[in-house]
Image (cartoon, helix red, strand yellow):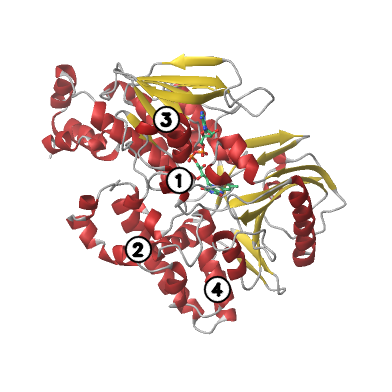
Amino acid sequence: MTARRERSGRSRRSRPLSGRSVAVIGGGFGGLSAACYLADAGADVEILEKNEAVGGRASTLEAEGFRFDMGPSWYLMPDVFERFFEYFDRSPDDYYDLQRLNPHYRIFWKDGDRMDVTPDLDQVRAAFEAREAGAAEAFDDYLDKSADNYRRSMDGFVYTDRPNYRDWVDLDVMRAAPVGLQLLRTMDDYVSDFFDNPKLQQVMQYTLVFLGGAPQNTPAIYNMMSHVDFNMGVYYPDGGIGAVVDAFADLAGELGVTITTDAEVSEITRRREGFLVETVAGGEGEGRGKGEGESETRNPDIVVSDADYAHTEQELLPEHERGYSAEYWEDRTYAPSAFLLYLGVEGSVDPLEHHTLVLPTDWDPHFAQIFDEPAWPNDPAYYLCVPSATDDSVAPDGHSNLFALVPIAPGLDDSPEIRERYRDEVLADIADNTGVDLRDRIVFEKQFSVSDFADRYNATAGSALGLAHTLRQTSLFRPPHRSKAVPDLYFTGAFTTPGIGVPMCIVSGEHAANAVVSDHGRQPDATERDAGKSGAAGARRTVAKRLANGPLAGLSGLSGLFR
Ligand SMILES: Cc1cc2nc3c(=O)[nH]c(=O)nc-3n(C[C@H](O)[C@H](O)[C@H](O)COP(=O)(O)OP(=O)(O)OC[C@H]3O[C@@H](n4cnc5c(N)ncnc54)[C@H](O)[C@@H]3O)c2cc1C
């Protein structure tokens, strides 16, 4: 980690939101990101977070010398984090150190087979060829296409928000036609063009769990995740994803954002000028949240919600101000929830790696039990995370820190009896398939499942991830950043575009801030224009770049001035 740099750029920037106040509901990555961009654009920003700390689904659990990342544990797409910090004249290593994991992950198949995916692609090719003749060449071909899709998609659809049909009918999008066509095929169909071996198909498809989908319902465009996985690499931020949350919160503080925790928004009322936002003491404790605590009000000009879209609309707004009906939300496909076991364990858990997948050779029945006929999976595919394999600080000496994550259907009944039975099944499955018997050496244990997601995060249907990335819920088919019913109300986070996952939520914060600046930003005043002129072409390029790349991007009319 390098010494934190003094920020140099701020005084040069135009501050189109000066004089505006914004309440950001929820301090997940989307809320933190939006808050940073908005504060940088001059707004007076307050994050109102229900829980005891920001981070949202990326919360941290500390107990008995163990520190667990409760949600995300894979640091993927480092380019997105770099781009975010660079906008504020900073870099991730001003805040946290990253190390590339080797292997990226280990797979235990339940037939006894095992495979490591490492940064050395020659090893991966050999592992593919060993399982299917010709698969090494197919792997190269697949990765080339995936890298190309990544580049086109990031430029065309991720960093550029395209919320309307007309946004798709422009030259750039037409040029990306292969990407568009892949929206119409499913991942299982696409992958089977390259590999026959079901295990290799799984390796190319497991990343779909990051998107909350199944191979049968996720558009083929997400094959770009293999570029993320194999070419870009899997990283660990020292201190875990919690350290990244801290970095975002620190940056927000440096930009002047106020963070208020234990403040659950209970109502948003539109006024002639701005909003009345009511909060109650949040959190999960007795007498807190759900309207039982002490109440306070705020009067922001603008509201940006990072809380689940359905929760914000259905529970915080009066009926006539909702952009979507209850039926719309009932009719959505939600990403899986999860059964999570956070375990502090005596001794080593070798041969489990930092990231370990345990997969049945046929995982279709598990996906069917998530999406088609919801039930607790009989033969689950699951994930084990052992950060203590990389980081001594997450467990006491002589102990391991491990969590098990089984994706399950959202909305599933997770009574204590069911959880207890399932817990025993999962621990037995781990012992049977990895040889690591944890059962008589667990010194700390906490379970987290459907009802906890609903209670702790107001998660719709207790989903761990939000709206799945099915075809009808991708890109312009996701709910937009601007409320359809209430002026000056905006949305960020996993329910909006570009979608699920920490990197995507960071970008969604940028899009939401762009929309706010576009709708509310004042034009640069004479001094700012003069400053632009005095620097002649170079300075014009700087402003134009900011207009094109940052929260000012929405000012398309203005950006035309600089062309
Ligand atoms: C178990 C698990 C594993 C994951 N693994 C990965 C991974 O490895 N890599 C990856 O990139 N992504 C992963 N993800 C996905 C990623 O964590 C999420 O997509 C992302 O963090 C969601 O961010 P968000 O902006 O949508 O906000 P959220 O994290 O959903 O936060 C919303 C916030 O709003 C708050 N809130 C809700 N209602 C109110 C209210 N009324 N008033 C005030 N505050 C409110 C909530 O408390 C919460 O803090 C994982 C998620 C989970 C759950």
Amino acid type shown at disc 2:
Leu
Q: How far apart are marks 2 and 3 (CA)?
A: 34 Å
Residue for point 46% across, 76% down: 192
The label shown at residue 200 is 4
The reply to whether callout 1 and callout 3 are in contact (CB within 8 Å) is no
Nearer-the-camera pick, 286 or 438:
286
Amino acid type shown at disc 1:
Pro
Mark 2 vs mark 1, foreground winner is: 2
Q: Earlier in the sequence, mark 4 or mark 3?
A: 4
How far across and how far down the image is residue 291, in percent?
Answer: 57, 23
Q: Earlier in the sequence, mark 2 or mark 3?
A: 2
Q: Does the residue labelled 1 lie within 8 Å of ligand 1?
A: yes
The reply to whether callout 2 and callout 1 are in contact (CB within 8 Å) is no
Q: How far apart are marks 2 and 1 (CA)?
A: 21 Å
Q: Earlier in the sequence, mark 4 or mark 1?
A: 4
Q: Quadrant of the C terminus?
A: top left
Within 10 Å of the Cα at label 4, are there few (<14), some (14-19), or many (20+) other Cα atoms? many
Mark 2 vs mark 3, foreground winner is: 3
Mark 4 vs mark 2, foreground winner is: 2
Location of mark 1 (residue)? 503
Location of mark 3 (residue)? 317
